[in-house]
Amino acid sequence: MAGSTAPKPVKRPATAGNAAPPKKTQQKKQPVGASAGKGKAPTKAAEKGLTQEEVDEKAAAILSEEILSGLSDADWKTRLSAVEQLTQV
């Protein structure tokens, strides 16, 4: 017979997934607001405590009702449209 029936093994090219991931060096991260080398205790940035009603009032003053209702919609396309409108404001 001319030829074999066994398939030849396929050699695949090396991909980035086969290589070992680069090693990350350990660095000390400074908290936000901390001075470098000053020896002071880091200060924690605190947000002003707002009630839900105050947040809703501020959002209604800045954004249209269409954007606010679109951001909380269950349909992802509606939320996307609302975010796109938000970036135009």
Image (cartoon, rainbow, N blue to C red):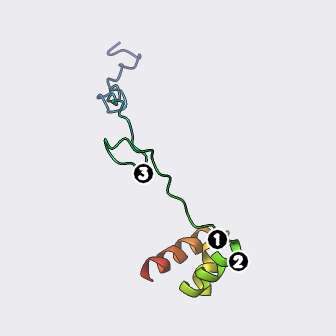
Compared to 49, does 60 lie above or below?
below
Q: Earlier in the sequence, mark 1 or mark 3?
A: 3
Look at 49% across and 57% down and name the residue there. 45
Relative to 28, 57 lies left or right: right
Position of residue 51 measured from the top left corner of the image (x, y, whole percent)? 69, 71
Given residues 8 and 4, the one toward you in this image is 8
Compared to 46, does 59 lie above or below?
below
Q: Earlier in the sequence, mark 2 or mark 3?
A: 3
Between the residue at mark 1 and the residue at mark 3, the CA separation in whole angstroms equals: 22 Å
Given residues 60 and 40, the one toward you in this image is 40
Q: Quadrant of residue 3?
A: top left
Between the residue at mark 2 and the residue at mark 3, the CA separation in whole angstroms equals: 29 Å
Position of residue 46 measured from the top left corner of the image (x, y, whole percent)? 54, 59
Q: Give the position of the C terminus as an image quadrant.
A: bottom left
Look at 32% across and 32% down and name the residue there. 15
The residue carrying pointer 3 sits among few (fewer than 14), some (14 to 19) or many (20 or more) residues within 10 Å by Cα, namely: few
Q: Quadrant of residue 72?
A: bottom right
Residue 32 bears which disc, if any? 3
Residue 50 bears which disc, if any? 1
Amino acid type at circle 2 is Glu
The residue carrying pointer 1 sits among few (fewer than 14), some (14 to 19) or many (20 or more) residues within 10 Å by Cα, namely: few
The residue carrying pointer 2 sits among few (fewer than 14), some (14 to 19) or many (20 or more) residues within 10 Å by Cα, namely: few
Residue to which mark 2 is pinned: 53
Relative to 56, 81 lies left or right: left
Q: How many marks?
A: 3
Position of residue 50 measured from the top left corner of the image (x, y, whole percent)? 64, 71
Secondary structure of residue under mark 3 = loop
Amino acid type at circle 1 is Leu
Residue 25 bears which disc, if any? none
Secondary structure of residue under mark 2 = helix
